[in-house]
Image (cartoon, helix red, strand yellow):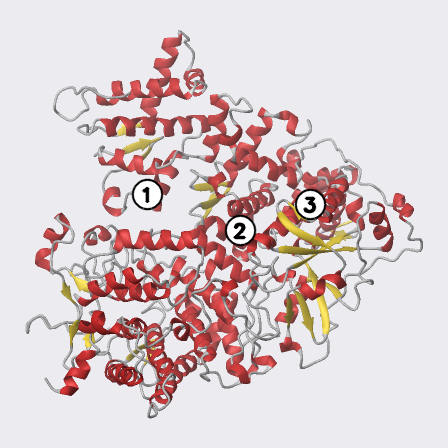
């Protein structure tokens, strides 16, 4: 062997344990080691970089298609070696060459994307696959090569990965962004990924759902990458230390927080179809380090290792058919039920061994590094240059498939890009993603590259341990002195609308300031801030507008802003006078203020304290709940609010410790006074607090309920006559609704259009807090709850679905995130034709569920689909059971929003208070049956029953067949649970529905204790329940009709019903229907 060969071999995997794990201190040895890796990088990576676009292919054998994801990883490996060479004084130009090769690749990707700026602009308003940036381009021309129909380009993790490494590389000193147009484009890439939390995409494996049926889904790995990218790029100057004020990138902190909360909620799942996925490894570890919640990291990592690790690498996810010999390469999508064929024979990817080595270095886990180095060593082979090659994947040969299925991990797998023999030469070239990460792993384990050089912005550290970024822009870096969530202080400023209100508050010992007193600081609405942000990222040349019109959330309004030399304080959205009526409910506002302060206290991640501006308006004093608001302010004055530390003070005293955001992109012009209108102070001639006695109190309004259904078939003149004689608000609302339906919104009554009359009536009813009339008018005006979309998404990522609609009529499922426009359309087309008030009432419930599931996910345990019509039915039943909790005349529609929310919480938490309040078994079954709440592992038990029931299960006439259900679905799959839930809801009476659940649990127990039993006939739940009812009635000696019998068993305690249900199972199913071994002895108890 020549000395040159020896040098090459020295850097190969064989010598990892002998040499690479030692800290290299000898300078010449370091140079020699780096030169070996330089040669490997030149031969294995740079040799395949396009000299024109700078892109890399996925496989070295591909001469036409450049892949963005693989190009980024190749660029990172080249940059890692560049970082290592910077330690060396005389590198003979290698460092410069490596750095510029990195820049060429990153700029090549940028140029390909800039040509598609029209897509970015369209994607900001509607996150659809048709507007997605492409992630495959022609290697030489940089033009798109695969259309949207040919390939799924919507992969948010790719754009996020690009942003993360753009910041890392700029921080290391590379110049990648050159012009102001490019700065604007990168700012628009931030808008592109901001809504990852509600954008179903095709994910890291480019296929979307596990079924490979062309459908995208919400992926935790994409959201995690986006969250990490937003954190990394916030406040980053794209021109590096030579930057100007207009080359800084801004991030919406609330968008970041939504991505963070939804990502952490989803873990350890990847998506609704994939319970576990190796794509989460690069998300929770290098390069994204998307969460620093240690228990989540360990849970996710352990889940991936336990379920996906093999002897040759990791499976990507279970039942992954990609590159399996049984996969039909000529067909893009799978047939229904085809996934079952791939179970147990999924390809294994050694790439993940490399990721685990890098993870071990970052987390200082030498045992993990050593374990995966050994595993990897057994899977590597050398190419003709003596360089190590990481196989793309290992597959099970066709002839050994049955052996592998019957005895997992027993068969010798074959590497994809290794010439096994001359007949079967599927070389495929080098898999560049794995090769690039291998180079990084070797540099790290060899001590040639420090983790801080590969991660200059310290993503691997929690935010409060990262070095503080110099400059005037907010950063996700909480100072250790304060800002770690546990001891954060939320600053609160109280702004009174008038001096007389300020004087009155002073008599209660509560200090407030008026808008004039805080000058020169401007107190403004957050909607005005939205208009300022519209200037951010504008580029007329690329036809890019600025930030899309999205509301600024609670965290964004807790910063103080500097705009063109002026200081601006924004009040939160809860104080906006919105068109939707919720803002009128004072009790709800008080609750919202507490929630707002808790939310900010819990999720604030920026340096500097949050400052929340609370407005006190004169109309608040007219409300009967004003006393509670004063109590809240007194609590804030004491320095706490439900466990959150607060500091109430004058704005001038709080500014120095606040989080200040400098909006320097506006500095070119004067202060935009046209956009910013100051919160107006009310002026009164006499400002003594005694004048407040002049303020009229809100009266408790009552009216007799009148029904005008009879007028539907009568002429319009009759409706007009009734309207002139009607004095009640709700009566007039109904009549105006009738005219609106018949004559249209512009029809005039007494010189005023129906539309204007409705708006005026809506205001009057709102001032009088007549909620039934308010809701009726709001529905006729087609109002939608503000920012309802994120709340629906929150419900979905918690593994639930939402269904809106009137019971027994058309219903619509929300199973994917939707735009506010789509939500409004669904609400009004599905509900309003059958129930006018229901169209807004169900929106309220959706909003409250979204809020509650974020803070109290346990309330929804056992509920798979939140059917809003049935939730309202449960509240009606609750109101009948506990009439004292409402005014006698109140119907559900007349409840205040706050009361409705309180009752919703009561209904969702039945198990917590049922015994204490003495709920009877029947009442409990009625409430739980409305929600279709089931015990833990219930749907898995139904699966096990189906395995033993070849003829299937019949629930209220709906048949769940054993075949093909058992083939097409898997035991813990969401789609199977939804199938069973759908059948259960067909049972019209809630108590009977709950008995069906109990019956299936009893049957599952019997079958588990009698493993030899198989049910020969279809399992008809209705027949079994009728038998149980009849037996129970007979034993009690009561002979009534079928309904009385059912009521009797539904009212019996659980211990009693279990006995009768078990008897029904034994009598009706097991006698003569058992497996043919005579009559078995059946174990029930």
Q: Quadrant of residue 527?
A: bottom right
Q: How many labels does the image show?
A: 3
Name the one closer to the observer, 950 or 74: 74
Look at the image and tell me whether residue 219 can be seen. no
Residue density around tag 1, few if under 14, some if 14–19, many if 20 or more, within 10 Å: many
Could you say which disc has been placed on residue 584 in the image? none
C-alpha gap between disc 1 and disc 3: 42 Å
In the image, is residue 371 above or below residue 983? below
Q: Which residue is drawn at 46% across and 62% down?
A: 196
Residue under numbered circle 2: 791
C-alpha gap between disc 3 and disc 2: 20 Å
- In what element is the residue under mark 3? helix
Name the one closer to the observer, 591 or 831: 591
C-alpha gap between disc 1 and disc 2: 25 Å
Task: Say which label, 1 or 3, has the lower sequence index.
Answer: 3
For the residues carrying marks 3 and 2, which lies nearer the camera in this image?
3
Task: Say which label, 3 or 2, has the lower sequence index.
Answer: 3
- In what element is the residue under mark 1? helix
* Quadrant location, the C terminus: top left
Residue under numbered circle 3: 590
* Quadrant location, the N terminus: bottom left
Q: Residue 599 appears at what percent x and percent y?
A: 59, 52
Q: Residue 703 appears at what percent x and percent y?
A: 75, 33
Find out whether the residues at labels 1 and 2 contact each other: C-beta distance under 8 Å.
no
In the image, is residue 538 above or below residue 377? below
Q: Residue at x 54, y 44 (%)?
A: 852
Residue under numbered circle 1: 976
Residue density around tag 2, few if under 14, some if 14–19, many if 20 or more, within 10 Å: some
Q: Furthest-top residue in view?
A: 1037
Q: In which quarter of the image is residue 1005?
A: top left
Name the one closer to the observer, 359 or 977: 359
Task: Say which label, 1 or 2, has the lower sequence index.
Answer: 2
């Amino acid at each position: 062997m020549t000395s040159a060969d020896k040098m090459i071999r020295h850097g190969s995997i064989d010598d990892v344990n002998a040499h690479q794990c030692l800290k290299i201190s000898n300078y010449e040895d370091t140079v020699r080691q780096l030169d070996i890796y330089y040669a490997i990088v030149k031969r294995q990576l740079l040799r395949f970089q396009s000299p024109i676009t700078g892109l890399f292919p996925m496989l070295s054998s591909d001469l036409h298609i450049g892949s963005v994801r693989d190009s980024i990883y190749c660029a990172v490996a080249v940059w890692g070696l560049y970082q290592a060479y910077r330690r060396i004084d005389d590198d003979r130009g290698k460092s410069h060459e490596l750095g510029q090769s990195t820049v060429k690749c990153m700029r090549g990707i940028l140029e390909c994307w800039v040509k598609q700026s029209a897509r970015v602009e369209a994607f900001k308003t509607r996150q659809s696959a048709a507007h997605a940036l492409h992630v495959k381009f022609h290697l030489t021309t940089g033009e798109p090569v695969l259309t949207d129909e040919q390939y799924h380009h919507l992969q948010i993790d790719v754009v996020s990965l690009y942003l993360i490494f753009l910041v890392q590389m700029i921080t290391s000193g590379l110049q990648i962004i050159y012009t102001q147009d490019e700065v604007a484009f990168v700012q628009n890439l931030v808008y592109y990924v901001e809504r990852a939390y509600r954008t179903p995409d095709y994910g890291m494996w480019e296929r979307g759902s596990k079924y490979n049926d062309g459908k995208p889904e919400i992926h935790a790995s994409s959201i995690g990458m986006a969250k990490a990218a937003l954190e990394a790029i916030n406040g980053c100057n794209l021109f590096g230390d030579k930057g100007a004020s207009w080359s800084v990138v801004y991030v919406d902190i609330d968008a970041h927080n939504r991505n963070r909360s939804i990502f952490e909620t989803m873990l350890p799942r990847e998506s609704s179809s994939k319970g576990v996925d190796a794509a989460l490894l690069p998300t929770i570890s290098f390069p994204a380090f998307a969460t620093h919640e240690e228990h989540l990291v360990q849970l996710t990592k352990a889940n991936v290792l336990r379920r996906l690790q093999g002897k040759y690498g990791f499976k990507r996810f279970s039942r992954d058919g990609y590159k399996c010999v049984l996969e039909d390469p000529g067909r893009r999508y799978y047939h229904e039920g085809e996934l079952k064929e791939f179970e147990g024979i999924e390809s294994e990817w050694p790439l993940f061994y490399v990721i685990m080595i890098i993870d071990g270095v970052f987390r200082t886990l030498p045992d993990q590094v050593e374990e995966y180095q050994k595993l990897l060593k057994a899977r590597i082979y050398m190419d003709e240059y003596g360089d190590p090659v990481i196989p793309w994947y290992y597959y099970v040969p066709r002839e050994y498939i049955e052996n592998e299925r019957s005895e997992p991990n027993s068969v010798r797998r074959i590497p994809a890009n290794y010439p096994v023999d001359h007949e079967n030469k599927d070389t495929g070239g080098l898999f560049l993603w794995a090769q690039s990460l291998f180079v990084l792993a070797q540099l790290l384990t060899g001590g040639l590259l420090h983790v801080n050089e590969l991660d200059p912005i310290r993503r691997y550290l929690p935010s409060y341990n990262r070095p503080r970024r110099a400059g005037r822009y907010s950063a996700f870096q909480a100072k250790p002195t304060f800002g770690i969530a546990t001891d954060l202080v939320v600053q609160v400023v109280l702004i009174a609308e008038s001096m007389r209100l300020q004087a009155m508050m002073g008599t209660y010992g509560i200090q407030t300031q008026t808008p004039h007193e805080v000058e020169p600081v401007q107190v403004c609405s957050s909607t005005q801030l939205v208009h300022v942000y519209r200037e951010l990222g504008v580029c007329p040349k690329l036809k890019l507008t600025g930030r899309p019109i999205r509301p600024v959330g609670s965290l964004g309004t807790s910063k103080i802003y500097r705009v063109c030399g002026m200081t601006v304080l924004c009040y939160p959205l809860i104080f906006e006078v919105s068109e939707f009526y919720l803002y009128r409910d004072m009790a709800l506002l008080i609750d919202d203020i507490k929630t707002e302060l808790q939310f900010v206290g819990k999720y604030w991640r920026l340096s500097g304290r949050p400052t929340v501006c609370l407005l006190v308006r004169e109309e608040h004093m007219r409300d009967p709940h004003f006393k509670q608001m004063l109590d809240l302010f007194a609590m804030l004055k004491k320095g706490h609010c439900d466990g959150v530390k607060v500091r109430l003070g004058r704005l001038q005293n709080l500014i120095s410790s606040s989080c200040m955001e400098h909006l320097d992109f506006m500095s070119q012009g004067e202060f935009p006074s046209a956009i910013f209108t100051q919160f107006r102070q009310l002026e009164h001639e006499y400002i003594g607090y005694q004048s407040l006695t002049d303020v009229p109190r809100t009266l408790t309004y009552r009216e007799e309920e009148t029904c005008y259904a009879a007028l539907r078939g009568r002429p319009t003149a009759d409706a007009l006559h009734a309207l002139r004689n009607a004095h009640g608000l709700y009566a007039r609302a109904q009549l105006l609704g009738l005219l609106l339906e018949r004559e249209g919104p512009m029809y005039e009554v007494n010189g005023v259009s129906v539309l204007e009359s409705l708006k005026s009536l809506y205001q009057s009813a709102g001032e009088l807090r007549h909620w039934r009339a308010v809701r009726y008018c709001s529905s006729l005006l087609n109002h939608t709850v503000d920012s309802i979309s994120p709340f629906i998404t929150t419900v979905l990522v918690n593994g639930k679905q939402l269904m809106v609609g009137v019971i027994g009529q058309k219903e619509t499922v929300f199973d994917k995130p939707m735009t506010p426009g789509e939500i409004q359309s669904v609400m009004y087309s599905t509900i309003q034709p059958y129930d006018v008030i229901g169209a807004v009432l169900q929106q309220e419930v959706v909003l409250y569920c979204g809020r509650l599931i974020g803070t109290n996910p346990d309330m929804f345990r056992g509920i798979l689909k939140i059917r809003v019509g049935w939730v309202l039915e449960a509240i009606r039943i609750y109101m009948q059971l506990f009439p004292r909790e409402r005014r006698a005349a109140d119907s559900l529609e007349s409840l205040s929003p706050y009361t409705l929310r309180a009752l919703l919480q009561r209904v969702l938490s039945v198990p917590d208070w049922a015994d204490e309040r003495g709920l009877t078994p029947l009442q409990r079954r009625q409430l739980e049956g409305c929600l279709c709440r089931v015990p833990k592992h219930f749907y898995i038990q139904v699966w096990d029953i189906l395995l033993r029931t070849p003829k299937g299960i019949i629930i209220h006439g709906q048949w769940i067949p054993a075949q093909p259900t058992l083939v097409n679905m898997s035991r813990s799959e969401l789609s199977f649970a939804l199938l069973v839930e759908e059948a259960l809801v067909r049972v019209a009476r809630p108590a009977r529905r709950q008995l069906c659940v109990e019956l299936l649990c009893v049957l599952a127990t019997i079958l588990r204790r009698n493993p030899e039993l198989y049910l020969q006939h279809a399992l008809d739940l209705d027949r079994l329940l009728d038998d149980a009812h009849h037996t129970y009635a007979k034993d009690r000696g009561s002979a009534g009709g079928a309904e009385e019998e059912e009521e009797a068993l539904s009212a019996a305690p659980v211990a009693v019903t279990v006995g009768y249900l078990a008897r029904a199972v034994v009598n009706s199913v097991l006698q003569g229907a058992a497996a043919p071994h005579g009559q078995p002895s059946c174990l029930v108890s």
